[in-house]
Image (cartoon, coloured by chain):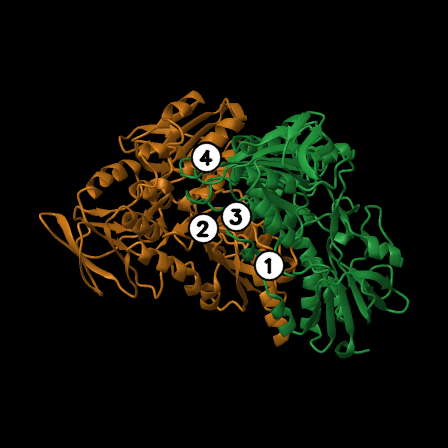
Chain colours: A orange, B green
Amino acid sequence: MTRDNLRIVIVGGGAGGISAASTAKAIAPQASVTLFSEFEDVAYSPCGIPFVHGKEIPSFQNLFLQQREHYERIGIGLRLETAVAKLHLKNHTVTSAADETTEWDRLVVATGFEYESPGVPGETLAGLHYVKNIRRAMEFDKLLDLVKRVVVAQATPLGIEMAGNLAHRGLEVHLVDEGAWILSEIADPDIAQPVQKSLEELGVTIHLGAKVLAFAGSDGKLQAASTTAGELPCEVAIIATHKRPNNLLAAEAGLKIGSTGGVLVDDHMRTSAQGVYAAGDCAEIVHGGTELPIQGLSGSHAYAQGRVAGANAAGEDRAYDPVYVPWGMVGGKVQVGGVSMGETLHKALGIPHVVAVAEGISRARYYPGVTKIRVKLICDPGSLRVMGAQLVGGEGIKERADFLAFTIKRGATLDDFAWMENVYSPPIGALMEPIAVAAQAGLAKFRSQG
Amino acid sequence: MTRDNLRIVIVGGGAGGISAASTAKAIAPQASVTLFSEFEDVAYSPCGIPFVHGKEIPSFQNLFLQQREHYERIGIGLRLETAVAKLHLKNHTVTSAADETTEWDRLVVATGFEYESPGVPGETLAGLHYVKNIRRAMEFDKLLDLVKRVVVAQATPLGIEMAGNLAHRGLEVHLVDEGAWILSEIADPDIAQPVQKSLEELGVTIHLGAKVLAFAGSDGKLQAASTTAGELPCEVAIIATHKRPNNLLAAEAGLKIGSTGGVLVDDHMRTSAQGVYAAGDCAEIVHGGTELPIQGLSGSHAYAQGRVAGANAAGEDRAYDPVYVPWGMVGGKVQVGGVSMGETLHKALGIPHVVAVAEGISRARYYPGVTKIRVKLICDPGSLRVMGAQLVGGEGIKERADFLAFTIKRGATLDDFAWMENVYSPPIGALMEPIAVAAQAGLAKFRSQG
């Protein structure tokens, strides 16, 4: 089989699927590339949805990156509003819900994620909303004009974004989370604290150590959330629970599923079946630091995995490295982020570590717009190699998380960061880079202890 | 001699001198540490001066980091307004202009820089100003309230900052430079172009390929600059010429001076004389990429060198690495920066290179405040190891320059950057990091050529 007569089928139209399709077509222009999606649209930015609800972005139309005509023009067959019901690995076909059969030589599974069910009574009431599909978001946005009170279940990154944006829109927002602090599964308490303060300043009421017990309503419409912190009257609720790999089709077809629930892939995004690849939130990926499998990464990761899966499906030989997971977001008006795991998770997993932490500043101390930047570096106690990082501040968090992910992956130590060169220019950078300040603080501490 | 009875003398009160003094005192608290400065103040930020003139920062008082009492409290002897006239290497003393003699066991030379003389008639006219000392800046600022027209000689980083700030203050500004584009000695034309456009939008008139021939005046007061681009009436002129190492005392004393005019130091900031160190703009430093000596680095570099010199003078054994020189600044309303040399300098020095260049974006395409970020990576043609970088955009330039300096120093290649993980979050980062976009563009180009 040459590249030219390959039939490549992609199941899923999110970041992973669409990048797999585009990459495959770029590499094998004569190949047949067909993408199935149960939804009406492809190539929009779901990550932008909270900000349209918050009126930071004027319209949902802004979120569309490409029209479907673009994909048709470059020769990708789009089968929208066409759910795939079954993957057949032996006879190399997929069957649609309408029982139509399509043959493939290479298959890319990019079926994305589903939100964990809250598992409480009242889940079918009108007013409960999952942030995912853009058409549902458009309908929900109209509803938001008619309501006053909203409960956001769980202080996950999405929950934080929705809480902040809906408060910014003027709604009364209650954020309910079981953790002892917000973002507790990814951020350390001292890192999450400024975000919590900023959300509260925006008017969000935060209920920590609390849990939704039931959603209550009448005539099928939500009226309140019963929580361990009391009854919270509300007309809408955002279910911002964990994302779980959508492995349904893959598991039914017999593809091996990993311990996280994600489709197992090797370093070429190959699944357990010959000619079948997976990419994005449906797959599990090796974490570079611990070599443990993880899932639920970012849209940027899905996109990168789709490129590798699509390229390999089209005949290339590309590897996808274990991930160090730089992350970052805006919570309230504060930027927060990190790389790999924080102090809390290292502790929970029993990984020996020491912590270097300090507050630096983003510009010259006297320059308007200067903000504090707290940097925490979690290090191997012997080598002082940095294993993870946590960051919070007013600006420059994403760029520092990218920098730290790149260098942590390559073995950078506290010494490397402590003496790094940095730009100094009053409007854009302080005399000492906050990462270097944290590293120096760590070295001073560990040397005086040693 | 133990650390405790060391007599450490520092000549110069800028970033290099003050960090040398503070570090030495921290390491050897019982040692005698004396710092001489011809000026009235220490520990202010000269880099902030243009922004006070521009009214971005309310007062010169904001620029002071510490009062002199701080240094006296921590036990540093400050000899302000005390110019040193001579360094005696054999008998280990310095002599002040008032002929007072001070003995030392370790000497740190941190005599800073001087602006190159414009070398034209009229240099002594009142109205010509060199941006350096804060007291002179305070006086000059009062003069700025009384004048309308200013000529800035040379589109150096300082010239660009002064031109932009004085235009922002409402003055009529003419910027005169011999280069074919602004910042021509550090930035490539495509990188400088957005800065030039922004300055012009602020109202700066830029005269390129032009030179000041003379300053003219009457009664000792400036009235115009005669330039190859015509007569430019002005009441004040900023002489933003190159910085030259102030090597006068060092050379007279017999310290070896390097090819750039900077005091020669080894990797411990040791000069050619036993017990004598140098730090900051008076010294020349090895450039990591080319192993050539360079001078005229940033305040951050001076500070770091002062720490090493001060620590070693107090008995430590610290090395200072060759530099890769991340730089960054704001010109007009645009951020510009880079690492090591750009395309133009690689070409001028005959260093074989290929160029990867692309424009990315700083946030999601649809998010308010998003700006283009142009990234250019100058690479070794064989290994595709990145040797230098140039950046221009609306935000995040300093952080990217720091990142690139750190990783270029450690041998990062286009492949490393092309597949880097990055944060994706609409308000703070795009789906693909601009550095990765540039690296991918380069790989696509070189692979299709190869």
Residue A252 falls in which quadrant of the image? top left
Q: Earlier in the sequence, mark 3 or mark 2?
A: 2
- The amino acid at mark 1 is Ala
Image depth: mark 2 or mark 4 in front: 2
- For label 3, the crowd category at 10 Å Cα-Cα, with few meaning under 14, some 14 to 19 and many 20 or more, is many
In front of the other: A297 or A142: A142
The chain letter under disc 3 is: A
Tags 2 and 1 touching, CB below 8 Å: no
Q: Which residue is mark 1?
A: A436
Residue A328 disc label: 2
Q: Is residue A236 visible?
A: yes
Helix, strand or loop at mark 3: helix
- Residue under label 4, please give it: A19
Q: CA distance from mark 2 to mark 1?
A: 20 Å
Residue A234 placed where, x, y %? Answer: 18, 53
The count of marks equals 4
Q: Residue at x 51, y 42 (%)?
A: B395
Q: Please identify, in this view, whether the residue under mark 4 or under mark 3 is nearer the observer.
A: 3
